[in-house]
Amino acid sequence: LVADLATRLAKCCYNVHLNENFSMAVMTRFLRGVCESNLWGCMENMNLLTLAVMSVISSHFQTIKTAQTIHLREFTLDGATTRMFPGVAFLCTENIVPASSCLKQIPLSLRTLFRKSSVQLPDMETLLCGLLRVRALKKPVTMARNLVRSVTTVYKLLPGRQYSKANLYRHLIEGAVTVLQRLPDTGEGLVFYSVLTDYFRFLLNEEQLQLTRSFLQQVYEVEEGTEVAVS
């Protein structure tokens, strides 16, 4: 959503997925680079950083905010002179997956520097149906409904559940469309079943994969042992 907004406003948005391996030096270089390049910096999973790093960048963000407030063209960040552009902005998201053991509580000193906003999730079935119509599928409504049902159910089995559903849907649709272009006479249900099975093959253990196969066979009305080559 942020990337789409940046595109519409002709802004360059640099996205970075944070984790506990990001050091203070790396984060400082990132902040300085965004300021000097007149970008939007989008930081995913802010609460996966260590508390020490969050504490330091809280001070850096306060310095950046002060520089923007008084319209400085240059300021000092971590002892180095840094240029500042008026269009610079920082956005951050929190990882809210309860199963993750790396989650930290974002310090209040850092949290108060950002304005909180919430985004209403779209009707994924309607959205996917539109995408499948554009790709000229014969049964976009049925395939969209089955795909949402499949991903919603199997997603619960993924370890840690830190995989992006949006990227997962995109990957599965691209894979299915590629197979249909190669095998245009193959049933769409069989193709989506094969793509889903192939994707989850390396993410689930043997028992989970067997349960997933059985479930997907019911959803897409595919007989056991029937599958097409994905790659």
Image (spheres, grey):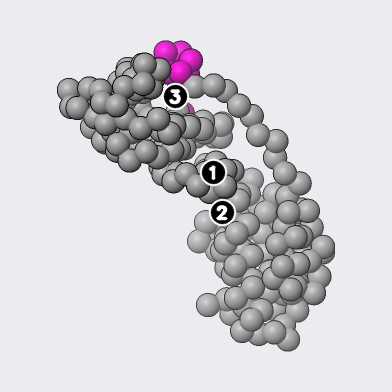
Marks 1, 2: nearer the viewer:
1
Residue at figure coordinates x 72%, y 57% from the top left:
128
Relative placement, left or right, of 58 versus 177 is left
Residue at figure coordinates x 50%, y 61% from the top left:
202
Magenta run includes residue 110 = yes
Q: Position of residue 222 (x, y in %)?
A: 76, 73
Residue at figure coordinates x 26%, y 26% from the top left:
74
> Which of disc 3 and disc 2 is earlier in sequence?
3
Tell me which amino acid carries mark 2: Asn
**Count the marks: how many?**
3
Q: Position of residue 231 (x, y in %)?
A: 53, 77
Residue sitting nearer the eye, 75 or 79: 75
Q: Which residue is mark 1?
A: 9
> Which of disc 3 and disc 1 is earlier in sequence?
1
Report the magenta residues as a range.
103-113
Separation of marks 1 and 2 at Cα, in angstroms: 23 Å
Q: Position of residue 21 (x, y in %)?
A: 31, 37
Whether pointer 1 and pointer 3 mark residues with C-beta atoms closer than 8 Å, the reply is no
Relative placement, left or right, of 223 versus 37 is right
Q: Which residue is mark 2?
A: 167
Q: Which residue is mark 3?
A: 104
Residue at figure coordinates x 31%, y 22% from the top left:
72
Tell me which amino acid carries mark 3: Lys
Q: Is residue 35 visible?
A: yes
Residue 68 sits above or below residue 217 on the image: above
Which secondary structure dominates the residues rendered in magenta?
loop
